């Protein structure tokens, strides 16, 4: 039985809070379509970096927060984020050794999957947001992934999050 002390839980929490702030900050209508999925990217990073601390249950909780923040059907983002966390945990050893551009493409695929799950649930409830409105955040997230990855990696190493 290992009794290692975990460090840096506050940094993980703050990163999710900042991602939530970036998710709900108002943008002009033209830019709203291209808003990256900040919460999903932060979740993917922490699942890759410290899979023993951030997993499916954290994905579910972060998804519930996202549901409330976006005034969505309770559970739709929770389900999508739990699936993203599961897939990231399953593939984290492979994703960590990819070059950053391949990681960005992988993140884009994971976020596209999240968007398709949300689109499917909205379709079941009778809403029709349009597929491009749901998939454009995945494309913009691909471009922002290197920034998120390098910033969080620097903070994780500086504060020795384990």
Image: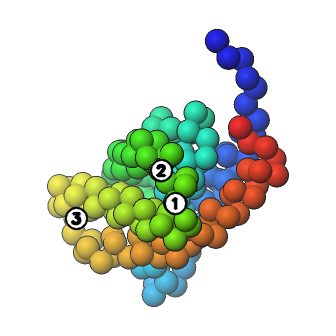
Say which label, 1 or 3, has the lower sequence index: 1
The circle on residue 2 is: none
Residue 136 horizontal/vertical position (percent): 38, 76
Q: Is residue 12 above or below residue 5?
A: below
Dot 1: few (<14), some (14–19), or many (≥20) neighbours within 10 Å?
Answer: few
Q: Quadrant of the C terminus?
A: top right
Q: Secondary structure at mark 1?
A: loop
Residue 43 horizontal/vertical position (percent): 53, 51
Q: Is residue 162 left or right of residue 66?
A: right
Residue for point 52% across, 60% down: 98
State the CA–CA distance, disc 2 to disc 1.
Answer: 7 Å
Q: Do the residues under discs 2 and 1 have CB atoms within 8 angstroms? A: yes
Residue for point 68% across, 17% down: 2
Q: Is residue 3 above or below residue 130?
A: above
- Residue 150 in view, yes or no: yes
Residue at the disc numbered 1: 98
Q: Do the residues under discs 1 and 3 have CB atoms within 8 angstroms? A: no
Residue 74 horizontal/vertical position (percent): 37, 46
Residue at the disc numbered 3: 127
Residue for point 70% across, 63% down: 151
Q: Secondary structure at mark 3?
A: loop
Residue at the disc numbered 2: 94
In front: label 1 or label 3? 1
Dot 3: few (<14), some (14–19), or many (≥20) neighbours within 10 Å?
Answer: few
Q: Tell which of 115 and 24 is nearer to you.
A: 115
Q: Secondary structure at mark 2?
A: helix
Q: Quadrant of the N terminus?
A: top right
């Amino acid at each position: 039985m290992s009794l290692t002390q975990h460090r840096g839980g506050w940094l993980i929490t703050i990163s999710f809070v900042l991602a939530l702030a970036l998710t709900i900050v108002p943008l002009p209508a033209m830019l709203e379509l291209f808003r990256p999925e900040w919460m999903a990217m932060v979740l993917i990073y922490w699942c890759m970096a410290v899979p023993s601390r951030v997993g499916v249950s954290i994905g579910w909780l972060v998804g519930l927060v996202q549901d409330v923040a976006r005034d969505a059907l309770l559970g739709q983002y929770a389900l999508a984020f739990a699936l993203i966390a599961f897939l990231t945990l399953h593939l984290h050893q492979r994703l960590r050794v990819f070059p950053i551009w391949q990681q960005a493409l992988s993140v884009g695929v994971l976020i596209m999957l999240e968007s398709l799950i949300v689109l499917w649930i909205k379709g079941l409830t009778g809403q029709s947001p349009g597929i491009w409105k749901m998939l454009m955040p995945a494309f913009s997230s691909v471009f922002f992934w290197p920034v998120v990855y390098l910033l969080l990696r620097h903070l994780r190493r500086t504060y020795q999050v384990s």
